[in-house]
Image (cartoon, rainbow, N blue to C red):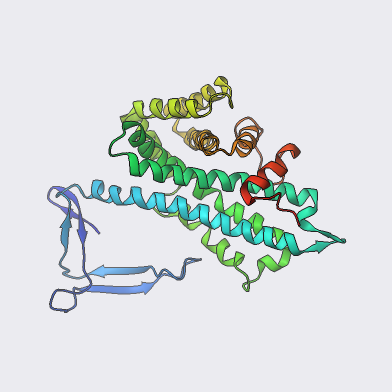
Amino acid sequence: QLAQMPEGLGCFLVPRLLPDSSDNGLRFQRLKDKLGNRANASSEVEFHQSLAQLIGQPGKGVQTIIEMVTLTRLDCAISSAGMMRAAVGEAVHHCRHRSVMGKLLIDQPLMRNVLADMSVDLAAATALSFRLAQSFDASQNDSIQAAYARLMTPVIKYWTCKIVPGFVYEAMECLGGNGYVEDGNLARYYREAPLNAIWEGSGNVMCLDILRVLEKNGQALNQVIESLRSDLLGLISESAVTEVRSVIDSANRNPGTARAAAERLAMLAAAAELRRSGWDDVAQALIATRLDGRWRCTYGMLPSQWVNPVLTAVFGTAAGS
């Protein structure tokens, strides 16, 4: 809990009960009636003469909270990737067993394209989340990893969490009307999907944090870009990397373009990590459609040459019957 001190905002731990087991003056006003996330209760609390323990330095509460928030932003990215995997798993399972006009959905070209196109984003979100976790582990002894962790935390949190609602909806549509009923998992996933993009800093907050990092430590961007350029050597043109850098520089001058910068950097980083992980086919599909391709608003527009390679990479087979 943040509270005002003479030195500024401080961060406090407020126990519900005192050491003698007596009440600590917490008054719970109500449980919030949330759209989703119902298993995790959220309440409105008033504090009445409550005792609290200061965490960190007086007046440094925001900095203390940020340390915690950085870790939970990683959690948001990882759990979003997990939800995407669960949703597309439901869709693939359904398509492997549902026949339409005498043919399984999984064997029909348009459905295969949709699933493959979704799988590109799933692979990107998974690769980015675990690459970010790796940078957290290595940041104590590696300045490049520390720069990656600081700059890419808001980038990866922004992109990964932001795409989940549309992604889960597309998985729901693969099931047709059965996906829209409460008996199945996808209705619950759909209600849950927007939450991680809102928690621990919404989309605009993430983008402003990116600009803050660039203002305070411009060298972090140079280190990250050089690392990505090295990982993508031979797979992407130098002009493509330069274009991403140009979009980021533009956002420094015009904050209204910060979302575009965040997404372009996320896609460049995803391609690099997919390549580093040996998923060259998926990396090339991502580059062709997310970096070099025209803007799209729905899944199912993947060039046909990438459909089978992507499905094979993500699901171990071509996902057919």
What residue is at 50 percent from the left and 29 percent from the top? Answer: 231
Foreground residue among 40 and 128: 128
Extreme residue in the right direction: 101
| Coordinates of residue 239 in the picture (x, y in percent) | 56, 20
What residue is at 52 percent from the left and 52 percent from the top? Answer: 81
| Coordinates of residue 76 in the picture (x, y in percent) | 44, 53
Q: Is residue 84 left or right of residue 92?
A: left
What residue is at 65 percent from the left and 57 percent from the top? Answer: 171
Q: Is residue 92 left or right of residue 13?
A: right
> Is 103 situated above or below 212?
below
Q: Is residue 298 something that shows in the picture?
A: no
Q: Is residue 269 left or right of residue 13?
A: right
| Coordinates of residue 93 in the picture (x, y in percent) | 68, 61
Foreground residue among 51 and 275: 275
Image quarter for residue 215? top left
Q: Is residue 244 something that shows in the picture?
A: yes
Foreground residue among 81 and 274: 274
What residue is at 64 percent from the left and 51 percent from the top? Answer: 315
Q: Quadrant of the C terminus?
A: bottom right
Foreground residue among 28 and 274: 274
| Coordinates of residue 149 in the picture (x, y in percent) | 37, 39
